[in-house]
Amino acid sequence: MSKVSAILAKFRNIFKHKAHASLEQHLINPERDWRLVLIFFALSVIASAAAHYIIYIKFDVAPLDIIGEPPVTRFLLKDELAKTVSEYKTKETNLNTLMSSRPAVVDPSN
């Protein structure tokens, strides 16, 4: 138990503000630096787990299944989806009509 209290005391000393800090206290301290790196890593893992929870659990994103049924489209409005598909089909027909006729190229040397 004394080891735990010693570790906690050292942990508290990391973040203590020293009013009259000497140059020796500002130099590189490997023990303090590794602890700060580990604390940053732990906070990063917690933040990424929270982001995972928010994106994949809370929003309930359905994975794309290639073999099975099509993905659930509960976030898409069917009318807007049909309108978008029809717009792309008209763009495709317009492009096909433009590409079917060859443009007349004038020879600049004449």
Image (cartoon, rainbow, N blue to C red):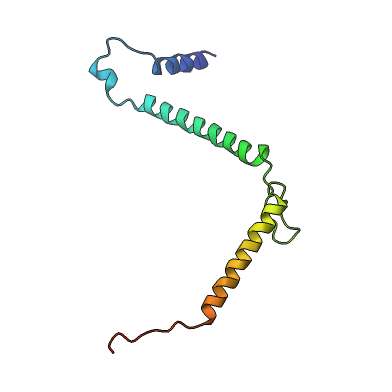
Is residue 45 or residue 58 the one in the foreground?
Answer: 58
Determine whether 32 is above or below 103 in the image. above
Q: Residue at x 67, y 53 (%)?
A: 80
Q: Quadrant of residue 24?
A: top left
Position of the C terminus by quadrant: bottom left
Q: Quadrant of residue 85?
A: bottom right
Q: Quadrant of residue 66?
A: bottom right
Q: Is residue 9 left or right of residue 55?
A: left
Is residue 48 or residue 27 the one in the foreground?
Answer: 48
- Count of marks placed on residues: 0
Q: Position of residue 55 (x, y in %)?
A: 61, 40
Position of the N terminus by quadrant: top right
Residue reaching furthest top?
19
Q: Position of residue 57 (x, y in %)?
A: 67, 39
Determine whether 81 is above or below 32 in the image. below
Determine whether 50 is above or below 32 in the image. below
Q: Position of residue 97 (x, y in %)?
A: 56, 77
Q: Residue at x 48, y 83 (%)?
A: 102
Viewer can see residue 77? yes
Q: Residue at x 40, y 15 (%)?
A: 13
Viewer can see residue 64? no
Residue reaching furthest right?
69
Residue reaching furthest left?
23
Q: Residue at x 60, y 72 (%)?
A: 93
Q: Is residue 72 left or right of residue 13?
A: right
